[in-house]
Amino acid sequence: MRPYWAMLNARFRALLQYRAAAVAGLATQIFWGLIRMMIFAAFFENAAGRSPMSKEHVIAYIWLGQAFWAMFPLRVDAEVAEMIRSGHVAYELLRPVDLYALWFSRSIAARVAPTLLRAGPILLVAVLAGWIGWTGPASLAACAASLLAALLLSSAFAVLMTLSLFWTISGRGLTHLITMAAYVLGGMVIPLPLFPDWLQPVLNVLPFRGLVDVPFRLYTGHIPPAELPAMLAGQLGWALALILLGRWILRRAARNLVVQGG
Amino acid sequence: MNAARIYMRYAGISIRSQMQYRASFVMLAIGHFLGTGVEMLGIWALFARFRMLGTWRLAEVALFYGLVNVAFALAESVGRGFDLFPGMVKGGQFDRLLLRPRSTALQVAACELQLMRVGRFAQGLIVLLWAAWALQVDWTVGRIALAAFAVFGGMCLFMGLFVLQATLAFWTTETLELMNTVTYGGTETGKFPLTIYRRWFRAFFTFVVPLASVTYFPALAILDRPDPLGSPLWFRCAAPLIGVLFLVAALYVWRFGVRRYRSTGS
C-alpha cells in the first residue's frame, strides 16, 4: 500500500501549489453559478408545468455543483497522457508496483486537491447568501458518505479516459465525448430529476448519476437519508465495475504496446 | 488586399497541419458538436418541464442560442490564435513577429485557425435553422440581413474580447482565466433573453460588454417583439454595429499594448 499512498500524497502536495489558478477559478465558478441560478429561477418564476423539484432544491443543487466541480472527471491526467505520447510510459511499466493502482492514486489526488481549494470558499458564499440551506445532520452525513463513493467512481472514470489514449494518440476527441456524456447524464447541466419522466429509468441505471446527482440530492433531502445504503451500493458497484474494466484494458494495452525509438 | 492573402496563406498551412491527424480532427469536431449540443439538450428538457420561460417559447430561445453560438464559433475559429499569445510573450517568439512588416494582430490571429470549431458552428447553425423554421416568422430579406448582421456583430464582439484577453498578457504574461467569465460566460448568458436576468447583470452585459447589442436587441427586432426595456426599433436594428466598434476599440488597445511591449528577454 505504501507506494500508492506516497504517490497520492506527492501529487496532492504538487497540485496544492496552484493556488493562484484556484483563486481565478473560484471567481469564474461563482460568476457561472450566478448565471445558472438566474436562469433556473426565471424558469420557476411563472412555470406552467409542474416541477418534481422545488426551486430551493434546484438552487442548492446548482451551488453544490459549482463547489464540487473539480471532482468531476473532466480531463485526463496530462502527465500520464504525455508519457503515453512520448513513450516514457515504458518506464512506468517497469516499476515493481501495480500500475493501475498507481494511476488510480494519481487520479484521486487530481480530484481531491483542487476540490479542497475551491469547495470551501464557494460553499461559504453559497451558505451565507442563503442559497444552500441547512437540511439536518442525517442528510449531511449521507451526502458526505456518498461524496466519498463519488470520488472513487469519478477517479475510475478519469483513469479510463486516460487509458483510451493508448489507442488514439492525440485522442482528445474520445475523452471529450465521455466527459460530455458524463456531464449531461451526471447532472451538471441540469438536475437529473428535471429531465422528462420517461428518461428517469434510463438515468437511474447509468453510472453517471453516482458522480454528482446522488450526493447532491441526498444533501437537499430530495433523496431521503434512509435510502443511503441503496445509493452507496449503486455508486460503489459501478466504481468496482469501472476499476475492473480499467485493469483489464491496461493489461491488454501493456501487452500490445509498442514503444518506438531508442 | 495583401493582408487578406497572407491570412489565407497562414490559414491554409494551419488547416493542412490539422489534417495530418485526420481521425483525431473528426473526433474533435464531433466532440465539439455534441459537447455544445448537450446544452441545447438541457434547454429542451427545461422547456419540456416548464413549457415557458416567462413569456418566451422554446423556438424563441433557440433563436438567441443559435445566434450567439454561431457568432462565437466564427470568432473562435478565426481569433483563437490570441489564445496562444501569452505563450509567445513568455517564450519570446513575439519579438520575431515584430520584425515582420505586417500587422501584429493579423499575424497572431492567423497563427492558429481552429478547424474543429466547425462542431460548435454546425450545432449552432442547426439550432438557428430549426428556430427559423419553428418561429413561423415571415423571413423577409430585411430579417435575414439583420440575422446575418447580428452574427457578424457578435463575431466581432467575441474577437474583441479575445484580443483584450491577449492584450492583458503584455502586462501579466499570463492569460487571465477570469476573462472566461465574459467569453464563455457571454455565450451562456446570451443563450437566453436578457430580461430574465437581474438588473445589475443586465447592465453589465449591455454597457460594459455589449453582448445585448448583438443578440438581444436584433433578436427582438427579428421576432417583432416590443422591448420591455423600451429601446426604439431603429436602435434594435443598428445595435450589432456596436459589436464591430468594440472590436475596433479592442484593436486600439492592442496597438497601445504593442507599443508598450518589452520582451521578457528569454
Image (tube, coloured by chain):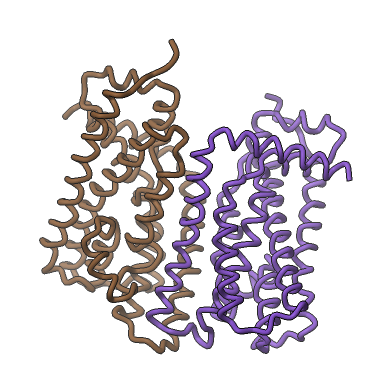
Chain colours: A brown, B purple
From this viewpoint, which residue is outermost toward the top? A262
* Image coordinates for residue B137, horizontal then vertical, percent: 64, 84
* Frontmost residue, A240 versus A114: A240
Tell me the quarter of the picture where residue A240 sits: top left
Location of residue B37 with respect to B266 vertically, above or below:
below
* Image coordinates for residue B192, horizontal then vertical, percent: 55, 74
Is residue A123 among what the camera can see? no
Side of A192 where A33 appears, left or right: right
Specify the quadrant that holds the C terminus of chain B.
Answer: top right
Tell me the quarter of the picture where residue B129 sits: bottom right
Side of A24 where B9 appears, left or right: right
* Frontmost residue, A194 versus B94: A194
Location of residue B126 with respect to B20 vertically, above or below:
below
| Residue at 33% from the left image edge and 61% from the top image edge | A185
| Residue at 74% from the left image edge and 37% from the top image edge | B10
Location of residue B90 with respect to B118 vertically, above or below:
above
Tell me the quarter of the picture where residue B83 sits: top right
* Image coordinates for residue B169, horizontal then vertical, percent: 67, 42
Side of B15 where A90 appears, left or right: left
| Residue at 25% from the left image edge and 68% from the top image edge | A217
* Frontmost residue, A48 versus B66: B66
Q: How many numbered marks have been drawn onto this rendered protein structure?
A: 0
Side of B248 where B86 appears, left or right: left
Is residue A186 among what the camera can see? yes
* Frontmost residue, B217 versus A132: B217
| Residue at 72% from the left image edge and 41% from the top image edge | B110
* Image coordinates for residue A200, horizontal then vertical, percent: 26, 70
